[in-house]
Amino acid sequence: MNSVRQTLLQTAAGIVALVALVVTVSTYRLSRRGQLTDRYLKVVALLASEKMHERIGGVFAAEQIMVESEKDHQTIVEVLSSFVREWPGHEGYPDDRELPKFWGLAGRRKSDVKLPADVQAALTVLGRRPARLEVRALDLTGADLRNANLREFNFRNASLVRAMLDDADLFGADLTWANLHDASLAYADLRMGTLRHAYMVGCTLRGAWLPPDMRDVYLVGSDCSGANFGENLEGAQINDCCLDRANLLGCNLANTGFATTDARNTLFALGRTADPNDIPARGMTAAQLERVAINSSTVLPYYLDPSSVGILVEEEGPLDWGSLDPIFNRIDDSEAEGAEVGEGRGEGASVEVAD
């Protein structure tokens, strides 16, 4: 009986201790949650302050919460992203610079207009955020990030639609699967980064230094004049782009789509010889250049005959692809033949009379 009583007492004591521990843990969690909520409210108040140093303090206080609390990671990312998006943007930023006579970043002066310190601080925190699963991708749609320091920034899957990234330092940045529709990256430095699978319809890349990995990028209808391309464009789509004075030396162009691309004055090689020092683009075929505009200043790799590829256009100015592109011409001819047949049968003919 004494042994049973002792066992029961020990069990009861253990249960009481366990209940006390659960209560203690719950109390600690509630207290910690309350502290984080209080800190979060203070962060929001600091970010809304009219004083620069308080806003900067709010940015780094938000980072501390994000590092300590995985549960609040997504919320802090969205708060800081909103903070970056909502700043009114640069005034008087120079956007009328001409391309240099040679390619890429060399020979041009970067703008002296800097991002405000609080916006740059928020970007720095977002760029070094902990590597965690994020339910929603980083959203910097329409943000003015011109001349920002975004070195080795994590833009993976990010929305940068209509973002202004002119002169931005994106050295080593990861833009895999990023959405850059209508974004401007004029004179941006993307060396050592990646744009693989990025969606870049209607982008401005004038004078930009592009990353080595641009495989499968969708770069359609973009201004790439004076751009310095990297090593690999395999499987990319650069249809309807402007490559005026662009540098594609040594670039892998296997399976790259070039339809209706303006390649006048483009360097695909330094010369027309098999000398390895000429650094010709690799993997190009005559079929790729069937619907590409070239001129006498276009330098093609030695293994392609300029007289049998491309559409020779010597005049300057915009191109009328409706008259230049043989496929468009065949479509127009077939439509004209269909119209003649319709007129002969008395079908589908109509005449409009001007007032």
Image (cartoon, rainbow, N blue to C red):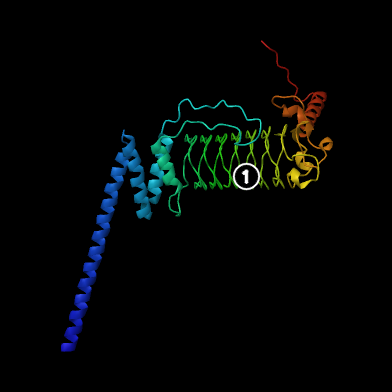
Instruction: Choose between 21 and 120: the one closer to the eye.
Output: 120
Whether residue 81 is visible to the viewer of this picture, yes or no, is no
Residue occupying the far top of the picture: 355
- Left or right: residue 46 versus residue 249 is left
Q: What residue is shown at x 26% (from left), y 63% (from top)?
A: 25
Q: Describe residue 7's horizontal placement relative to residue 172 as left or right.
A: left
Horizontal and vertical percent position of residue 284:
75, 44
Q: Quadrant of residue 297?
A: top right
**Which residue is at the front of the view, 155 or 106?**
106
Residue at 26 percent of width and 47 percent of height? 38
How many C-alpha atoms fall within 10 Å of the one at disc 1: few (<14), some, or many (≥20)?
Answer: many
Tell me residue 13's x, y (percent). 19, 76
x and y percent of residue 320 in the render? 72, 26
Evaluate whether residue 60 shows in this view: yes
Q: Is residue 54 left or right of residue 264?
A: left
* Residue type pointed to by label 1: Val
Vertical order, 276 against 164 (above or below): below
Q: Residue at horizontal 43%, vertical 36%? A: 85
The image shows residue 223, relative to residue 171, as above or below, that is above
Look at 62% across and 47% down and name the residue there. Answer: 212
Where is mark 1, residue-wise? 217
Residue 50 found in image quarter: top left
Where is the N terminus found, in terms of image quarters? bottom left
Mark 1 secondary-structure assignment: loop
Instruction: Residue 202: give x, y in percent of width and height.
Output: 60, 34
**What quarter of the picture does the C terminus occupy?**
top right
The tally of labels here is 1
